[in-house]
Each structure stands twice: as structure tokens, then as C-alpha cells.
Image: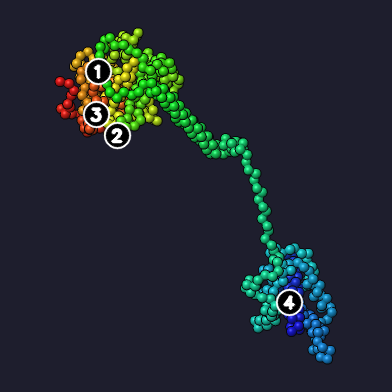
Amino acid sequence: MSDNYIDKLNEEQAAAEAKRKADKIRAIRASLHADEPQETAPVQAQTVEDAVSAAEESFAAKFDRVRRNKLAAQNRADAPPAEEAAPVTEVPAEELTVAEEAFSAEEAVPVSEIPEAIRGLDIPDEAPVTEQTPVYERAPVAEAPAEEPQSAAAETQRVQAVPPRATLSPMRKPREAWANTPHTEPRMHQDVKKKKKKKKKPKTLGQKLRGLFPEKGDKPLEIVRKFVFLGSLVAIVVCGYMVGDYYLDLWRSRMEYSNIDDIYRTYTPIITSVEEEKDIDNKYYDLLPGAKKLLDINPDVVGYMTIPTIDGKAIVALPVVQAEDNSKYLNLNFKGENSRAGALFLDWRNHFDVVENHRLVEKNSDNLIVYGHNMADESMFGALKYYRRYDSYYESHPIIEFNSNYEQYTYKIFSFFLLDAEDDTDTEYDCWNTLSFDDEEEFYDFVNEAKRRTLRTNSVDVKYGDQILTISTCNTDVIGNDRGRLILMARRVRPGEDLYEGTKNSEKNTNVKWPNVYYEQHPNEKYDPTQFVPYGP
């Protein structure tokens, strides 16, 4: 068993030596071709090629004899003394020396130049093949005599003389076998370990903030993106501040007015009935307890308005002031401080219980007009929009309590409608400019115009001599701009009259008289005057 192993090992070594010798031959041939002039005749090139081929065959024969001699010597050394080894033909020393010197070089030759007879040999790993043919110094080579071309049979015999790959390397496995064999040794070629990426230091807050602004080296598109982002950020901040400040101001205003209502109601409760007045001309007027507290805060106070809910909290409970014009309290609250909510104020032309020395010195106006803002948080007159939006809202809030500084008065709502403040057509109705009535006809013309426009009809009667209360606030539900107005019109409750009489069972008005701007938006609708039932005789 050991003899076979040694034979195989020797064969592999012999194959390696044959490879190196073949490389030397190809190097010599390449050197010859490199120095050969281009004008050389074809016959001369053929002669050199034949000489090289003859040299290759000669060296191959010598190498085969050397290999056989080495194998025989090894077998004789391992064999028992009693046995006689087979005679071995020795190769002359001169031939061995020449062969060894010729194939001792370590240079490699391109694969394309390896003879077909040697390509089948197994190439060991320690003899790599390169794709570039090195340049060698030309060695003197004797010209070989021209030989006759060998026959096809001789050529076949010469090729078969070279042992096949399986014969020369019986111990070498095919590549497919090695691919399925588990590795027990570490690989010769290890993958290069990837260098660990250095962790970037986290940016500081200052660096992040500076990165939001255009920097040197930024591309134009990046600069534009940053400017757009910064502009949007500024807009968001500004709008957020404005919205936040708006609602914060409303919240402060509501807290202020809530405290004022607590003060006023502590001394002046809501009345539930109206008593008949006696001897009006000689009536003695004295300040209401709640009014005294409010006058200590602001001398412009002329009354206090409440719109109660039948079974709940009042939707309006605010003091009413009066100035020398209708603009002072648009942006000032009851205390005279800047406020978007402003304050409720009586038209500066109205007279409402003007008293001196406890006596009435000026007759009250026939039509009292009170203004207030329509706030988004339902403060001031912000809740009045629900009279138009909800059918049941009127019956839950049909009365208004409007006290002067001296007396308590209750009004019953008989109409609420929408107006165009800038209407100058045939539908114009500037109810805020009519303060008094010269006669009965003028009175009924005024209240009937309000009845034609009401969004809900009711059974509240209106008679000549009744004092009228008009409430005006902004509304954009129908008109759609700052020209729209929501008007609530009420008449004073008569002595001994039930507060809620005629306010029940209201119905939606199907024949409303709208301002012309409404008919422009709804051309298929129109007002029919023949269906209207007026107040009065």
C-alpha cells in the first residue's frame, strides 16, 4: 500500500517538473519570435518552429527516462534485500545536466502558448500562470535541421505518450468533489475585513439650527428649499401666535365679564314679572344696587343686558356702556382696556333713563339700539347666530332683560332677520337709524317691515306705544361678507303681561323678505306681499 502511495507522489512531482520544463521551452520560443525580423521568409520561420518542436520532443523523452529511473531507485530502496529489482536503463549524466539546466528557470509563460500535449497536466498551486509574457534575453540556439513532416499516426503516438491527467495525478480529486468536501483547514485567501465606519458625532442643537439657514456650498435648489421652509415656519409661528393671542384675549375677557356678572347679580336679581307703573311723571328714580357697583368701575355704564334661557344659563349677561360715538368700545372692554371682544354699547343718539336728581330729564327713545361683536367663542353676541341656525332656539330664548341704571325692563322678541348694511335698493331697511316715531303709521311701517323679514313667525303682538329694543351684530351666514347683519327686535313687556305669552309654537317663515343681494344668489326665490299679515288695525 505504501509503494502505491510513493508511486503516486513521485508521479505528481514528475508532473510538476515537466510543467516547469515546458515553461522554459515556451520562454525560449517566445524570445526567438520577439527578436526575429518581420522580413524573415516563411520557410525560415517554419524551420525554427520545427526545431523548437523537435527540442520539445527530445526533452520530453529525456524527462520520461529520468522519471522512470527515479521511480525505480525509490522502489529498490523500499524493497526487501532478498528481492532483486528490475534493471533500469540509466540516462547519461550529460543529458541529465543539460535537461536540468534548461528547465531550472522559474519564469512563467502564458497559457495560450502551452503545447497541447502538456496542457492536460495538472498545474500545482505554487506555479501560478500569468497572462503577460516576460521579456527574456536571447540565448544562442543552434539551428535545427529541417525535418520532414510527421505522419498523422506518428503525431497521434507522440500525443498519447504523454500520460493523461488522471494517470499522472490519481490522488487529485475533481473540482466538483472538492466543492462538496467540508473544509478542515483555514482558507488560504481570507476575505478582507471591512473597516468599521466611524460613528459620526451627533450634531449639537446649535449646529442643527444653523443647518436650517442657507450655508456656503449649498446648491441653488437647496437654498430655495431652505428659504421656503423658513418662510413657512415664520408664517406658522405668526399665525399660531395670532390665533393663540386671539383666544387668550377672549378668555381673559370672559373671565372679566364673569366677575362683573357675579357682582351685578349679587345685588340685582332677574325679574320674573312686570308690575303696573303708577304716576310716571312724578316717579322717583334711584340707582339699582348692582348699577352702583358698575358705575364705580366705569362711569359710561347705562345698563345691564341679559338674555336668559328658560331652563338653563343665560347666553348673554353683560354691562352696556354708551360713549359720544359708536366706535370707542369696538376694541375696548368694559374697563376701558384694549380687547378684541370690545363691549356692548348703546347707540350714542339714544336716551335711556337719563336722570338728574332722581328725576327723569329726557324721554326715552322709542327704539333703543345696542351693538356688540359676534365672537367665535360665543362671547358678547356670538351666541345670537343660533337663532337662525336652530328652529327651537327662539322658543328657548324669547325674552331680553335690559335694565337701566334705575329700572328693570323686560322685552319680548317678535322678529329676528338678516340685513345688508350697505343695501341701497328697494329692499333697504336701516332700522338702526330710526330712533323715534312721529305717528302711528310710521310706527307700524317700521315694525311690519321687521315682521316681513323675520325667519320665524310667532304670536307676539305689537301695538303703537310699545318701546322697541333692537340688537345688531355681524353675521356672514347668508350675505357672506362684513356687510351682513343679524337683527333681533323685541318690544317691552307690558305691565301684568306674561313674559312668554305669544312666544310658543313659532313656525318657520316661508315668505321671507330678503335683501337684494340674497335674490342675486337665489334668482328662483321672490317675496310675495299678498301673503303677509301686518300688525295694527
Decide if residue 534 is on the left or right side of residue 129: left
The label nearer to you, 2 versus 4, is: 2
Secondary structure state at the residue bearing disc 4: helix
**Which image quarter: residue 209?**
top right
Mark 3 or 4, nearer chain start: 4
**Which residue bears the numbered disc 3?**
503
Hey, which quadrant is residue 132 in on the image?
Answer: bottom right
Q: Amino acid at mark 4?
A: Glu
Assess disc 2: are there few (<14), some (14-19) or many (≥20) residues with their C-alpha within 10 Å of its C-alpha. Answer: few
The N terminus lies in quadrant: bottom right
37 vs 187, nearest the viewer: 187
Q: Which residue is mark 2?
A: 390
The mark found on residue 276 in the picture is: 1
Badge 2 marks a residue whose secondary structure is: loop
Q: Are discs 2 and 4 less than 8 Å apart at CB? A: no
Q: Identify the residue position indicated by label 4 in the image.
A: 12
Residue toward you, 331 or 460: 460
